[in-house]
Image: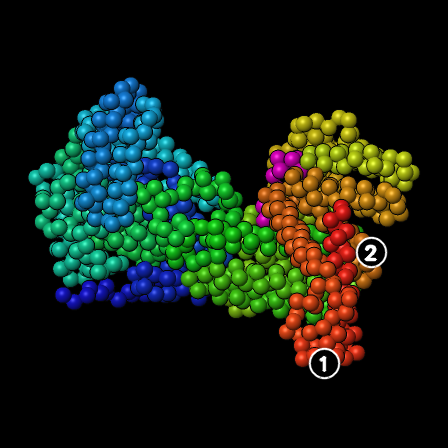
Amino acid sequence: MDKRVAPEWKVPVPEIIVDLPPLKLYNSLSNSKVAFIPKRGKDVKWYCCGPTVYDTSHMGHARSYISFDIIRRVLVDYFGFNVKYVMNITDIDDKIIKRARQNYLIESYFKGASSVSQVKEDIRSAIKLLEAKSKTHPEPDQREYLKREVNRLRMLLTCRTSVMGMLTGAQDALATYLDAKHGSSISDYEIFEALPRRMEEEFHNDMRSLNVLEADKLTRVSEYIEPIIAYIEKIVHNGFAYAVESGSVYFNTKKFAETEGHFYAKLVPTAYGDAAKLASGEGDLSTTESEKRNFSDFALWKASKPGEPAWSSPWGKGRPGWHIECSVMASDTIGESVDIHTGGVDLKFPHHDNELAQAEAYFGHSHWVSYFLHAGHLTISGCKMSKSLKNFITIRDALKQHSARELRFAFLLHSWRDTLDYCADTMNQAIAFNKIITDFLFNVSHTLRLLASSNSATTGDLPESQDLSNALSTAEKEVFEALCDSIDTKRAMLAIRELINASNQVECAQPLVTGSTHLLPRAHQCYALAAFILRLLCVFGAADRTTLADSWTALCHPSSSSVNGSRWPISRDCVVKTASKPIWVSMAAPKKETLAAAFHGAALACKQFVYEVKDVASNVGDVAALLSNFEATLKKDFNLDWNSISNNANAVFDVALKQALGECATLERVQAGEVKALETEAWPVLARLLYAVADLRQGLRLLAQSEGPLKAQLLTTCDRLRDDYLPVHGIRLQDRADLATDKPDLPAIGLVEAKLLTFEKREKAERAAEKAAAKAMRMQVKKEAGKQPPSEMFRSQIDKFSAFDEKGMPTHDAAGKEISKSQLKKLQKMYDAQAKRHEDYLASLDL
């Protein structure tokens, strides 16, 4: 039989002609990148297959929904499309029915189980059931897993444990056994509604935690029973489905495939006839293969059996098949032409191919979906992710290890349609990228503080070696081309990294300090770069919308860069005006509780620091004066008193805000958590405290240089503030110096994730430990070398020397020839060096 080949994909014919970006998407219907042309101008109708809500969401769900969220955001926020995004919730399905019954039965069993012997007997029955499945399951991985489970349960039976220990260890196997034995007796149909409701709520919470946008329209199968029945009736009327005696209705794949103008299994033509894949799409509770006309036919309506929920239909009591659900909901909400349809790559066949067949049989044409996008598989440390194999990670567990931003960076750094391996290496790349962005923004924030504190700044053009215009222009062009190339976020992210590298190279070559030449144009470019990067990260859903991000208004430029010569989208005057007070420079929008915690933490850290300084140098006049002035400033600016700092961070910050802003409408907006007010009013209050703390420490470090006996103690105390007290509150403090004068300059201080600072501290400690270990190794080698007395070092070299004096110095070489004066001089140097090493060795023994 010839290999089946899908018909050639045809470019959609738009009903409305508009200018479109040169965007191409990888289309599973053509297995290639093709121009994206929506039917109605820039209006895009998109249907996404949502979850079957029978269990907790896992990283496989995150793989699909974060990927599609990124694509959706790029289409809307970068290319300017108007997207209607519809997603379904499958709340009627064999998996849900089976899991709800199992949960109900195992809960009842746990309550009534008291006899160890009875539990063991039931476990033995469960083992027999698993053993039978391990021999017949179509998937090799599943067969191996079931065999391991059988062996594990047999070991459990030999262990001395309590009834609860037995139940817990065999819960899944017992649930399967109990369902096989008692599932058909379930009459409480409320359980089939309660489980999906609870799991759906968990799913939405997980998506919010991952910063995935909500669908414009959310549909549920349970709300579509009547439309599904009507849809099936029309397919039957059109001759592509048939009812059987049991009350089930099947789609006639043979009739559809043989009808001119139709083609079954467009996405995976070679899967037509694959019994295992076809069976996987029919559900766990399907047992009526014999009533089909063709073995590849699939259920549109399933006659319900005892223990299963049911709805009335023209064919009797039953429920919808899995595939028909999506066809109906997509057709109802979008119509007979879908621009984009998405789902995981595992849904290609049979689910999506069956969806296509049903809709085309219903509408009578062959172009229901224009573009099918499939997110790639997710593996766990190189192994297939599978719930049934117990090889999966829930989204909640993943978020305990990594932030939502780090997870999104992991996806952004990989193609949305390729397999992504969730492992340490993948996440380390994401963490490293997060640090690159964070460090860059931290330096930009410091540059803007330098600008604000500078009395004079050169306003002319930058020398070519410091001008980043070309680097930004290149990045803009590269990002545009990458996103036009099937939303290649990996390439776009690399462009961001290259832009930051260019900025870092300029900073390394010509570090900015207070009063630097070209401070204003450099600060202007840093501000613009940060705005561009943050705006792009907003598009990707990896950063929040902030004033700085929104200041970059010229994001998508199909024909030319926004940086044209000296004309930048953000003016220097704008930067000077904005930098007149502290600017919020971060991927995250400020939150009241975050600012309050940092303010409170800074106050507590500084309190401890001041007390330690007083213990060390309370009698030093200049130190006492510095501390007195600092405490007076805290009282005046923030109404902050060491002796009355509350444990309530919000209360302490509220007092400071009231002191700084007064009773006004601005304070009310801050208290209400308005983002702009938090950026422009609350953050400057916190920033001024941080700057005051950094300046106090800087002043004490300078004083320490002249306080001979106290120098080491003062500097150590200052280091503890920087390295220990501030980082635990998410505050990074870095010392900066003017390399030209070798004098300390304005220190850099700001908010950074405490997790990142902990990581930096651990890395620093590890580097110090490695350095100490290397030094110890060198000392040990030196010590070993020093064990030998100098009188013995040459005597063993009989291949070189034949005679020695009383000190052990060679007098004749191996041939008996007298050592020359020049050679003797070299040997004497070696002898003296060994004598010194031996002397040090003997001294170490005395210690």
* 33 displayed left or right of 843: left
Q: Residue 196: where, in percent of width, then height? A: 33, 34
Q: Residue at x 17, y 47 (%)?
A: 298
**Amino acid at the residue labelled 2:** Lys
Q: CB atoms at circles 1 and 2 under 8 Å apart?
A: no
* 523 displayed left or right of 187: right
CA separation in Å, label 1 and label 2: 62 Å
Can residue 190 be seen in this snapshot? no
- Which of 528 and 205 lies nearest the eye of the viewer? 205
Residue at the farthest right position: 621
Residue position marked by numbered label 1 in the rendering? 817
Residue position marked by numbered label 2 in the rendering? 743
Mark 1 packing: few (<14 Cα in 10 Å), some, or many (20+)?
few
- Which of 240 and 335 lies nearest the eye of the viewer? 240
822 above or below 145? below
Q: Residue at x 79, y 45 (%)?
A: 715
798 above or below 174? below
Q: Which span is picked out in magenta?
A: 587-598
Residue at the farthest left position: 245
Magenta highlight on residue 4? no
Label located before the other in sequence (1 or 2): 2
- Which of 426 and 272 lies nearest the eye of the viewer? 426
Q: Residue 465: where, in percent of width, then height? A: 70, 70
Q: Nearer the viewer, mark 1 or mark 2?
A: 1
- Which of 133 and 302 lies nearest the eye of the viewer? 133
Magenta highlight on residue 588? yes
Task: Tell me the colour scheme of the image.
Answer: rainbow
